[in-house]
Amino acid sequence: MEIFEEIEPLRAFLQGKRSALNSIGLVPTMGALHAGHLALIRACKAENEVTVSSIYVNPAQFNNQTDLDKYPRSLEADIEMLKAEGCQVLFAPQDTEMYSGKSLTFDFGSLDKVLEGEFRPGHFSGVALVVSKLFNIVQPDRAYFGQKDYQQFQIINQLKEELKFPVELHSVPIVREKSGLALSSRNQRLSDENKTQALFLYHSLTDAKDQILNGVPFAEIKSEVERRAKQNRGVQLEYFELANKNTLQPLEDLKDIHNGIILIAAFVNNVRLIDNILLEKKR
Ligand code: PAF
């Protein structure tokens, strides 16, 4: 695997690889890799001749300094995992390579005011900034993101449409532990007991999906989830919402239920976790 910390050598290398026959796929990550990331690498490798992964903990997308400081970092282990998966190129820059002090901000209208956007002001602007930089640096034909960050994918899609990035975006299904817990780099900060508590997220989603498909009004389901969260010492619920999967605005018309998605965010032992479930198909 070729490893680059600087933009110009990476660009020169990719220039040599780019041709009508070779497509370049990008898997942007913040490291602390797990099986969910490896599923992205595999999806990328299946469709592209060259797979580029990036590892960069992007300060611009953290609205909380402690969260940034505590974000798990394991570059050496990540490199071994990428090599084992057959990733050909890694871009792992330092902050000085990515940011020059000046900055840009983005506004995605209604899409970044709800859900994550409401609880993490500025987060999606920071994501859009770093993803724009990565798209400009790597100029991938395709880019791969996890469905766990569902709203992030919608934001990046809007970014691509507005800025005319010639890249095909792919969303890869959530990888879960056997228990149902969605894989996340942040799970490293959970004890076994915390992991059991964290199943609150998955169970709330799957129970709600069954209930909705059986005609139970969402308002009823939501107040029950809020009530259970209050009784659960380890869990602090931030939101639990039913939304239209394209606009992420609240889904009110039940005729539209097959375009629905339920999304949840909660702190478990001060670790912020998110998860979601689409309503389109039966489990
Ligand atoms: O999903 C992530 O890991 C990050 O938000 C991303 C897309 C790599 C941008 O920093």
Image (spheres, rainbow, N blue to C red):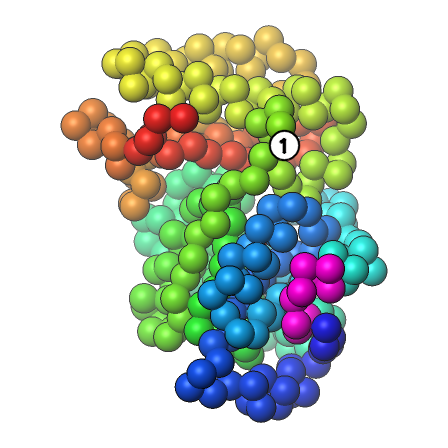
In the picture, measured across the screen, residue 174 lies left or right of residue 210, that is: right
Q: Which residue is mark 1?
A: 177
- Residue 237 visible at all: no
| Residue 209 coordinates in the image, percent (x, y) | 38, 22
Residue at screen point 16% across, 28% down? 255
* Res 212 → quadrant: top left
In the picture, measured across the screen, residue 77 lies left or right of residue 2, that is: right
In the picture, measured across the screen, residue 28 lies left or right of residue 226, that is: right
- The secondary structure type at the circle numbered 1 is loop
Q: Around disc 1, counting alpha carbons within 10 Å, would you say few (fewer than 14), some (14 to 19), or many (20 or more)?
A: few
Q: Is residue 279 above or below residue 83?
A: above
**Range of residues picked out in magenta:** 82-91
| Residue 201 coordinates in the image, percent (x, y) | 54, 25
| Residue 52 coordinates in the image, percent (x, y) | 60, 70
Towards the viewer: 239 or 168: 168
Q: Is residue 19 above or below residue 275?
A: below
Screen quadrant of the N terminus: bottom right
Towards the viewer: 34 or 227: 34
* Res 195 → quadrant: top right
Q: Is residue 24 part of the magenta span, yes or no?
A: no
* Res 30 → quadrant: bottom right
Q: Amino acid at mark 1?
A: Glu
Residue furthest right in the image: 76
Instruction: Count the numbered circles shown.
Output: 1
Towards the viewer: 157 or 272: 157
- Residue 163 visible at all: yes
Residue at screen point 26% across, 36% down? 259
Residue at screen point 67% across, 14% down? 233
Q: Is residue 149 above or below residue 207?
A: below
Residue at screen point 48% across, 49% down? 172
